[in-house]
Image: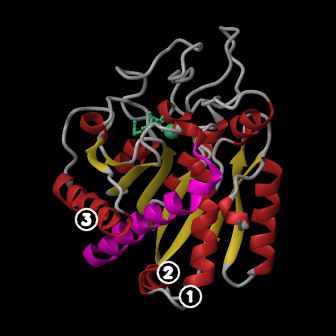
Amino acid sequence: STFYERYHSLEDIYYWINRTAQDNPDKVKAILIGSSYEKRPLYALKLTLNNRPNKKAIWIDCGIHAREWISPAFCLWFVHYSLSFYKQNQDIANILDNMDVYVLPVMNPDGYKYTWTTNRMWRKNRSISRSSACTGVDLNRNFDANWCTEGASHEPCTEIYCGAFPESEPESEAVANFLRLHKDTVQLYLSIHSYSQMLLFPYSCTLDEAENHNDLLEMVQEAAQKIRRYYSNTYKYGPGAKTIYLAPGGSDDWAYNLGIKYSFTFELQDRGHYGFLLPPSHIAKACNEALLAVKTIANKVIEKT
Ligand code: 0X9
Ligand code: ZN
């Protein structure tokens, strides 16, 4: 199997980030956007495949949740595919001619590390609570979108602990700060999770419909259709609250409310057979179908804007 068909330790991923930037100095820059609770750097890669003026951008983050290993694997896959097939593949060429792409391979490095050393099923970050012996905040409940209402918890011992206040965690604060700074260029926000095979869009923090609901629905529907046609796999799609569950404080809803009107969370393979423990032999297919969804949606964004 190739490098991209395996899961990688945090150290390997840092090495890969560095190496990818070094080997492609004209196309890739590593940007330090902040650091984690345990002071690990948060590096995003910026892909710039041509230098048109006033280019818009896509943001993709992976690894918010520590145990969802297919997610960082997808970010690596995406960067590699973009750099390798820019000249051959029409879809990716059209995207990268029109947009820059920011890729954050591991938003929760402390949690990811912990899943490799201590507890494979860890979800949250590793921040120590003042009020409790339990560790970790759910970074996808820590954003300022109906923060800590139904679907999140103030109890630090739960898996859906929202933190002491919105953006209390350095990882969510770093992403929020970066997006606030770049909100006029970032048009498409993508957050990669697993598992359950779903293409979700706002809102998850309320049952209300997003203002451009029909556009968003059309995009994920087309993406899901293509996955069915090309990979014979089924993805559910719809607004988060009605498709998966009510869950406030998520990055997708927050980015949407910031003004990034095309905002999605992908739940990659599988539908529960292996769950978070998706074997490496499934990485290629899981990433290729997610890639098809990214291409479909990004090209629709370009068409519409
Ligand atoms: O609960 C979550 O954060 C996501 N599911 S997961 O199994 N990967 O934990 C779904 C996120 C959907 N979006 C929001 N809740 N905003
Ligand atoms: Zn997740």
In the visual, does 255 lie left or right of 224?
right
Q: Horizontal and vertical percent for residue 56?
A: 44, 74
In the visual, does 22 lie left or right of 66?
right
Q: Find disc 3 in the rendering and name its residue.
A: 222
Q: Is residue 207 above or below residue 294?
A: above
Q: Horizontal and vertical percent for residue 174?
A: 62, 46
Position of the N terminus, as image quadrant, is bottom right
Residue at 39% over, 35% down:
145
Q: Is residue 57 above or below residue 91?
A: above
CB of residue at label 2: within 8 Å of ligand 1? no
The stretch drawn in magenta includes residue 302: yes
Q: Which residue type does callout 2 highlight?
A: Leu
Q: Residues within 10 Å of mark 2 (few under 14, many from 20)?
A: many
Q: Find disc 1 in the rendering and name its residue.
A: 51
45 or 55, which is in the foreground? 45
Residue 65 placement: quadrant: top right
279 or 44, which is in the foreground? 279
Can you tell which mark lies on residue 275? none
Q: Which residue type does callout 1 highlight?
A: Asn
Residue at 68% over, 19% down:
135
Residue at 19% over, 52% down:
213
The local secondary structure at tag 2 comes to: helix
* Sooner in the amino-acid sequence: mark 2 or mark 3: 2
- Disc 1 to disc 2, C-alpha distance: 10 Å
In the visual, does 44 lie left or right of 235?
right
Q: Find disc 2 in the rendering and name its residue.
A: 96
Position of the C terminus, as image quadrant, is bottom left
The local secondary structure at tag 1 comes to: loop
* Sooner in the amino-acid sequence: mark 1 or mark 2: 1
